[in-house]
Image (cartoon, coloured by chain):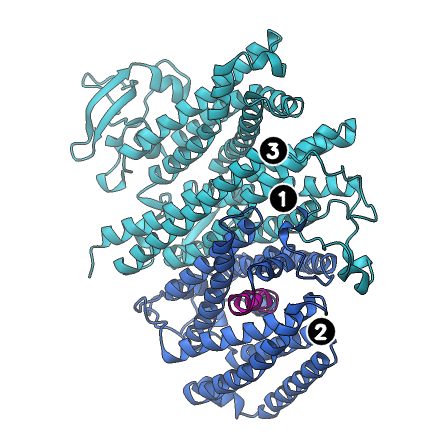
Chain colours: A cyan, B blue
Amino acid sequence: MTDPSLMIGLARLDFGWITTMHIIYPPLTIGLAAFLFFSEWRWLKTNHDEWYRLTRFFEKLFIINFGAGVATGITMEMAFGILFGPFSQAAGPFFGNILGYETITAFMYEAGFIGLMIFGWGKIGKKMHLFATFNVMFSSMLSAMWILDANSWMQTPTGVHLEKGLFVVDSWTDAIFNPNFLTAFPHMLIACFEIGLFFVASVSAWMIYKNRHTKLFIRTLTTSLMALVIVAPLQVYMGDALGRTVAEYDPAALAAMEGHWHTYNADGSPNTSWNMLAWPNEEKGTNDFQIAIPHVLSLLEDHKWVSTVPGLDQFKKADRPPVLIPFYSFRIMVVAGMALMLLAFWALYLRIRGQFSATKLQQHRWFLRAVILSSTLPYIAVWTGWWTREIARQPWIIHGLMRTSEGVSQMSITAEIIWFIGFVFFDLLVWFGAWYFFSKVIHKGPDMKTAVIHGVTPETMHLGDMPDEEASEGKPLFVRPTV
Amino acid sequence: MQHIMNITHDYQWITLVWWILIGLFVVIYIILDGSDLGAGIYSLFHADSEEKGSIMASMAGTWDANETWLVVVGGSLFGTFPIAYGSLFHYLMIPLMLVLWGIIMRAVSLEFHHYSERSRVYWDWGFGLGSLIVAFFAGVSLGAFLQGFPVSQTTVPTFTGSYLAFLTPFSVWTGVTATIAASLAGGVYLRARFDRKSDIYHKALKWTNVMFYLALLAILSTVIWSFIQFPWARNKWIGPYWWAFVLAGAVVLYATWAMRHASHQKRDVSAMLWLAVIVFINFAIMMVTIFPWFVPDTMTIFDAANPSNSSGAFTYTMLVFVPVMLCYNFYQAWVFRARLSKLAGYDSHA
């Protein structure tokens, strides 16, 4: 028999890797879909062709991102059963059904309308096209809802009971609207908008920085950054709300995130110190060193000056999550979120001072550079946030009910390593490919030459309406959208 | 094997409906993506770079929708047959992993081919190789599935074998068969998709003729092999309902003749539809042969099912959504139904 802890560790690494490489794409899909709907709606409303050009330009980036998301996402659908078979069997009655709902009511719905959105230009009417874009936006959000629901239920598994090794659903309402879901879903959804908006802002800022198509991109830069003035602080607020949900339902996870070992000080008073930086020592059950500020922890978790926050010493050693990664990944996420909020405020300050025109912004080189670089931070925040969430839930796969060691497939180390190496290769291929083609499309800039497509015209109607013979001669036939 | 829980009478029929539905999803996936995969395999052997581009272009609007059926299979299997999902996929770890790698390679190639210039040749190869890998290892998975797998004698049966348990001469042979069958489907698809004056249209005819006889041989030998190796199949086929299988076999033979006839008369879409009928009936015969097993000799449909009461709501949802999904899949194929010429590469309108 091989070492079980190595096998479990590798299974987690295998799954963690494919999840990490998948979560890069869907949030941008969701955020960008919302943006596409907005810009197309502006086009229909104002009849300014700039909005059409912008929609078509960002749509190209959207397609690349969506393709990468599908390529990495099909893996996820199968990986539960492969890597965590016993978990899938036990949790199937709830978890599997929720993923089933996601596939049927969101994924298929989205795939259908994306086809119409991408290939439908000139083949369906303008309003019908906007409707397709709306459905892409809506279905992608629905998809995020189901996925977050399944994941949140692993954090707070309400509405079920265990019977002969399987989870039986007692109340669908309790299970679907589990406490974690109510704060985690908004937190994730806002993260998607934030990624989308910063992505748009970053591309627009680069264009203005390079003095290209400034008339177009000042529109998107202004819109995205002004939206972020609301979205970025809202995200900080939602993060705080989620933090308090975790404190209430999974105090061990919260203690790990904060490196909080001792519930009480040596003199018996509640330990309210918040560790800004620390180096946890899991053997000794304390921090080797820490920079701590009194009262901040109780203010953060309970919004009170003094309160008892359970430390890791309240939990058996076997029930304690690892501390190092949750502690630091949580901090990185928070810093990233704060930095993005400050950047949005900087933009607001410039806007108030009347600096938001292309020529004036070009004088603020550092501001534009900051916005260009800002698009990396939401990704880092999503990654670190997700790692915090998944690792701080350990050693449970379903909190309090099923341990990760009980949920893992009994696999050979060799197979796990082959899996890992293969997916490192293919997922990096997808990632580098996506970014390479992003940069290529961005570098090329929006297409300003092709005529604007206003609904259905004889030139753009689909070939099926033409006789067979005619279609084969003359102009080369369409396949991709008539770009 | 004992039932994990007492399934009430109502849920027995829900389970049965789901078994049929999932079978339906699988066969829809095989029919739709089989052609795409086969066209990819064809492109490995018979096409210059421009032709490869136009083959990819021919499925640009539909390949991802076709693949979504695979995701539907995964999602609904997880929801309604979690016992099978958790053990079968664990057993099939290696072939499914390779299928996934093939799918990723193919998806990336299809998407990136459009934007590339210097790197185009790699995406051409990625598309063809990815298709070949998916077809072969999906066939291997099917063969391994038919063989069954060892499970633990616990209330929830988990897979207990080695990660190479899937690999046998039979599963390798079903992999070969699947590759040949997909190649045939790909040829038939290309005949229907490309302009009658184009080179591909004529080259695909030769390809289709060769693949037709190879497929006939491969499938017949798989049937004979199954008859010899699997008692559950043999007993069903020569059991009291032997005449039903003979009848179904006769329908398959007629459909085969009709496909060839349509193909000779250049009614290419009809040929494609007859091929779909053949695949559909063959798959149905397989399902009936396997019944009441979910995985032959391993777990019955009721052993594999979601043992709790949660499938009911899911069933009603599906009854609404499946027709909708079928409608838009059809609509998509309809929008992109026109024939293509070689010129219709991605780049012709960039």
Q: Work out whether B10 lies above or below A18.
A: below
Instruction: Give amino acid for label 2.
Output: Asp
SS of the residue under disc 3: loop
Q: In this view, does B140 lie to the left or right of B40?
A: left
Asked if marks 2 and 3 touch (Cβ < 8 Å), the reply is: no
SS of the residue under disc 2: helix
Q: Give the image quarter of residue B321.
A: bottom right
Q: Residues within 10 Å of mark 3 (few under 14, many from 20)?
A: some
Q: Work out whether B5 lies above or below A377.
A: below
Residue at the (82%, 59%) spot, across then down = A466
Distance between the alpha carbons at the discs numbered 3 and 1: 28 Å
Asked if marks 3 and 1 touch (Cβ < 8 Å), the reply is: no
- Visible residue check, residue A457: yes
Please, which chain is the residue tagged with disc 1 on?
A: A
Residue A446 location (% of width, % of height) = 64, 34
Instruction: Give amino acid for label 1.
Output: Ser
Residue at the (29%, 55%) spot, across then down = A417
Q: Work out whether B303 lies above or below B232.
A: above
- Which marked residue is nearer to the observer: mark 2 or mark 1? 2
Where's the C terminus of chain A, which quadrant? top right
Magenta stretch containing residue A147, yes or no? no
**Magenta stretch prevailing secondary structure:** helix
- Front in this rendered view, residue B280 or A452: A452
Name the residue carrying label 1: A139
Which disc is residue B268 wearing? 2
